[in-house]
Image (spheres, rainbow, N blue to C red):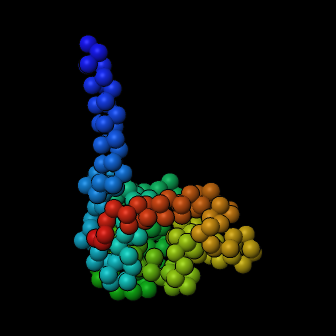
Amino acid sequence: MKRRVKRKRFILPLVVIVLGALFIRSDWLGKRIYPISYQEEIKRNAQHYELDPLLIAAIIRVESNYKLAAVSRKGAIGIMQIMPDTAEWILKQDDFGAITVKDAGTQAHAGIALGSWYVKDLHRQFGGDLTKSLAAYNAGPGKVRSWLQEGVWDGDERTISDIPYGETRHYVQRVLYYYKKYQDIYETL
């Protein structure tokens, strides 16, 4: 009887250690916990717009968790949660073929194309600064510019806690979290 108790006391911690090691450093397990859907569309658009595909994946994860027909309570549509007015504006800025605003809300290729273009444009507007660009993706570029001009937020990743909109502050933190997590798990898409 004592031998069984000693064996159980030894086996249980061993199992916990092995499972813990698998959980912490297992790419296989990491890819199961943090999957990336629509990889080909993400890769194609990331390459076209010279963006990191893992960044696009992180934005999608936070925006819609890869749900094509997602609609926010504020009216943002599709996999990358673009506001219809923003989608309409984006469509006028570049040649997207036959893509429509409606497509952005229901089709992966359309939503990822418009969202990726917008991320690239925000990078341009904010001098390539990722944190500012992410804040602008959520709150709008005009709002972020006003925060910067009024000294409400300096735009630095270390001062995300100064972003006055809780939703935007949380959004930027979550995208950066998933972006770093994807970088740890996936070498590339």
Residue 8 found in image quarter? top left
73 relative to 79, above or below: above
Does any portion of residue 163 appear in the rendered image?
A: no
Does any portion of residue 95 appear in the rendered image?
A: yes
Residue positioned 54% across, 60% down in the render = 173
2 relative to 41, above or below: above
Q: Farthest front residue?
A: 3
- Residue 144, given in percent of the width and then of the height, sits at 63, 73
Residue positioned 34% across, 34% down in the render = 13
- Residue sitting nearer the eye, 92 or 184: 184
Residue positioned 72% across, 78% down in the render = 149
- Residue 145, given in percent of the width and then of the height, sits at 65, 77
- Residue 164, given in percent of the width and then of the height, sits at 68, 62
Residue 102 found in image quarter? bottom left
Residue 71 found in image quarter? bottom left
- Residue sitting nearer the eye, 177 or 147: 177
In the rendered image, which quarter contains the N terminus? top left
107 lies left or right of 139: left
- Residue sitting nearer the eye, 90 or 183: 183
Q: How many marks?
A: 0
In the rendered image, which quarter contains the C terminus? bottom left
149 lies left or right of 174: right
Q: Farthest right residue?
A: 150
- Residue 175, given in percent of the width and then of the height, sits at 47, 63
